[in-house]
Image (tube, rainbow, N blue to C red):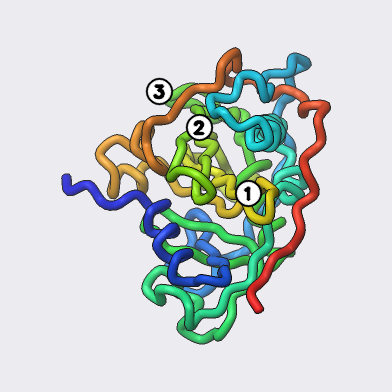
Amino acid sequence: MRRPVPVVLALSAAIVLAGCGYEPEIERPGAASGDSAPPAPAASTGPVSSTPTFTPEGCPVDDPAMCEQAAFLANALVLSDGDAVFDLSRRVSWMCAELQRELFPQCGDRDRLTGYVIANHRGEFFVDTPADYRDALGFFVEAVDEEYSDELGGPQMQILGVSSCGEGPDASYHVVYLVGLGDPESTLPADRFLGTYELTMEKGEWAVGAVYIGLLTDWELVLDDPLSQIACGDIQPWDGATANLNPPQSESQPTPIPATGSS
């Protein structure tokens, strides 16, 4: 199989062209290609363990500020806490004239994209409104199907580790995860999803700059080994983390994330 350029590299190239900044939105799992995605289903929160798992000290990156945010994010994910993930996310505003149109389908009929970035396995980016992004997180984070299992384990959020991309001020870090998701209002079976939350720095603050998600089987169409190649590969595990547990959130609080935009 021909190995494509990781989607994160496509986003990085688009950001370079954007200059002042921009934001993409990605279609939700199961949605048809196009400018918008159907509303994501709501779901109940998954099981919770009483043992904290992810700490900044166990983070495999030598950046305390980033690790503080990454630990809070990882614990929010295993807690199925979509609101906490929303609070950790950065809102953007980008001019379509500064973007690579083939990566941003919404620019076909818009001049500016404003909202929160979601990306799919094909390297296409979409920008959701705050309300739509919250709905999307309601599925991505909270729709854990307690009855799902496969050769990779149970349905609970599994944090595989952190993939580092770039160096210096342009570096970003992907928290990579697996999860079994299902629509509680549908008769369709649950499925295995693979994704990342990319933490980027802007104005001295680390925040989720983009969410990448898709069916594991879809990632297998574009990567030989998605579990090791997603983002920038070289996924480093979180020291001391326990797999398949949903621990309570870290007592530390995330740094407030200001909205950003181009002028």
Identity of the residue drawn at 50% across and 76% down: 106
Amino acid marked by disc 2: Val
- What residue is shown with label 2? 162
- Residue beneath label 3, please? 151
**Given the image, on which type of amino acid does mark 3 rest?**
Glu
User: Residue at point 67% right, 25% down?
Assistant: 56
Front in this rendered view, residue 184 or 112: 112
Where's residue 78, x and y in %? Answer: 66, 30
Asked if 171 appears above or below 99 in the picture, the reply is: above
The amino acid on which the numbered mark 1 sits, given as a three-letter code, is: Val
What distance separates the C-alpha of mark 3 from that of mark 2?
Answer: 22 Å
Residue 32 vertical position relative to residue 225 in the rendered view, above or below: below
Check contact, mark 1 vs mark 2: CB within 8 A: no
Left or right: residue 75 versus residue 171 is: right
- Could you say which disc has been placed on residue 89 in the image? none
Q: Is residue 46 above or below residue 84?
A: above
Q: Residue at x 42, y 51 (%)?
A: 8
User: Residue 107 appears at what percent x and percent y?
Assistant: 49, 80
Q: CA distance from mark 1 to mark 3?
A: 30 Å
Q: Is residue 253 left or right of residue 202?
A: right
Instruction: Give the SS element for disc 1.
Output: strand
Q: Disc 1 versus disc 2: distance between alpha carbons?
A: 13 Å
Quadrant location, the N terminus: top left
Quadrant housing residue 231: top left
Query: Which residue is painted at 54% across and 29% down in the image?
Result: 61
Q: Which mark is residue 208?
A: 1
Between marks 3 and 2 in the image, the one whose residue lies nearer the viewer: 2
